[in-house]
Amino acid sequence: MSKNNTSHFVTYEVETQEEIFDTQLFPDHIFDGLPKVLRRGCDLYPPSSRERDVFFSSAVTLVSGCLPNVHTYYDNQKSYMNLYTMITAPPASGKGVVVQAGAYVKGIEEHLLNEYNQQVVLLEAQGIIDGEEEEKSKKHKPKIPRKRHVIPANSSSASFLGILADNDGNGTIFEPEADTLAQSQKQEWGNFSDTLRKGYHHEPVSYSRKMDNSHVVIDCPKLTMLLAGTPRQVGSLGLNSPENGLQSRVNFYYFDSLPSFKLMKGRKDNSRQLTMESLGNIMCDIYRQLSYNQAGIEIVLTDGQWDFFSNWYARKMEVVTRKYNGYTSAMIRRSALSTIRIAGILTILHEYESDPLFRNDKVCCTWQTLRKALAIAEVYMNHNLVIFRCSEMATPDTTMHAYIDFYNLLPAGEFNRKDVLDVAAAVGFSERTLDRRLEKLRKSGKLISMKGGLYKKHK
């Protein structure tokens, strides 16, 4: 594997190769007490298996795009439940399970198509559109938006944004063959990676169309993305580099496996298909109930839960950046947001089991659900770090490590420059540059400058 081959990773070290073969499975306790609409699907696969993990990752991602009007507040910003996930493994290694999870969105697609057909029939009856003549008269008569839950990955940028606008800003990219999206992104007409980056945070996107001289702004895009592909396709999408801002927004589930042949059976068993059809119908009902709730439902965490969550990620930030470098900080921050969204997904699905009509405008996340979401996010983080270690930017940053050590060794109370001369020497900072080091920590918000040349750590 050559460094110059941008469609793949750089050469693996032995340690990294072993980690790829033995990436972490989701712990069994994650599956205990899952909402029934997820657990019933996961129970179709063997416990402690890649198949079950891949199905769960696929299912929870697709479900994240089926929860309209469910939100929480994260860092004072309204955030919906949408996730980005990529299942990454060699060809013929079990990624096909991703396709099975597509049953969760199939019923919604059929529902939206039926709604569209009913609108057409109604407007034809009222003489507002001309049925078969609609195409001929579209310049003079209104066009009915054709909503689609799943947006094709091989769309042009204009087409993608047009469908997203017709969907009121909602859309799911579901592509079991990541090459389809990769090829589209290489084309000038098909590159909407900026929309994917903005859509993750619901930032406004806009586009103009020459044909009808229109300018459309999508104020709050709510995008979901589920991809499956090989390690080479990770590179084709540019997701092998931390400089691509999309990488840190994606939850990777990455594995390799020793060659084996699955025991085949020569009989037809419809039980799995029937179960998935049932789950798809349930998901469609959840989608419809939430669609009717225009006021929305807020997922709420207590102050104690936010403190626990923040402290957990503060420790994780220090451990990971201390081991690698500053490029990992974006991964940790976006993993934190993903964690809260996963907690929200599980919370609203549990709420459906007790109140299918969603009559509460606020639903509280339990401690058990928050801890489960953190356990899920930690597995993704470990897989993401395998991706990160395969890049050329994974070299440890010893200068940043020294800053972290220096900060950790500073006194807990007030101190002045003279008080920390020994601390600076211990981590290799010269006395001549100590002032510059303290000033940098002050500007970053880690130190507070007091009167009389005193400093204090920011809590």
Image: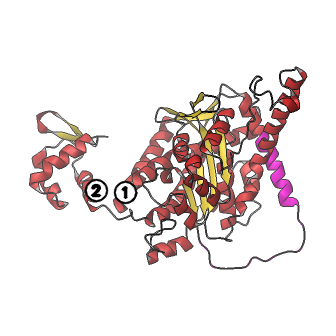
Which circle marks residue 321 in the picture? 1
- Residue 12: x and y in percent read 46, 74
Q: Quadrant of the C terminus?
A: top left
Question: How many C-alpha atoms fall within 10 Å of the one at disc 1: few (<14), some, or many (≥20)?
Answer: some
Residue 294, relative to residue 454: is it above or below?
above
| Amino acid at the residue labelled 2 | Met
Question: Camera-side residue: 435 or 299?
Answer: 435
Alpha carbons under labels 1 and 2: distance apart: 8 Å
Left/right of residue 400 with respect to residue 96 in the rendered view: left
Q: Is residue 279 magenta?
A: yes
Colour scheme of the rendered structure: secondary structure
Q: Going 68% across and 71% down the picture, which residue do you hit?
A: 92
Q: Are marks 1 and 2 in contact (CB under 8 Å)?
A: yes
**Secondary structure beneath disc 1?**
helix
Left/right of residue 439 with respect to residue 312 in the rendered view: left
Q: Going 88% across and 65% down the picture, which residue do you hit?
A: 269
| Amino acid at the residue labelled 1 | Thr
Q: Which residue is mark 2?
A: 400
Quarter location, residue 41: bottom right
Q: Earlier in the sequence, mark 1 or mark 2?
A: 1
Question: How many C-alpha atoms fall within 10 Å of the one at disc 2: few (<14), some, or many (≥20)?
Answer: some
Residue 82, relative to residue 144: is it above or below?
below
Q: Which residues are magenta?
A: 256-284
- Residue 301: x and y in percent read 54, 37
Quarter location, residue 348: top right
Q: Going 48% across and 61% down the picture, which residue do you hit?
A: 240
- Residue 72: x and y in percent read 56, 35
Quarter location, residue 233: bottom right
Left/right of residue 453 with respect to residue 146 in the rendered view: left
Q: Is residue 263 magenta?
A: yes
Residue 19, relative to residue 404: is it above or below?
below
Question: Camera-side residue: 19 or 142?
Answer: 142
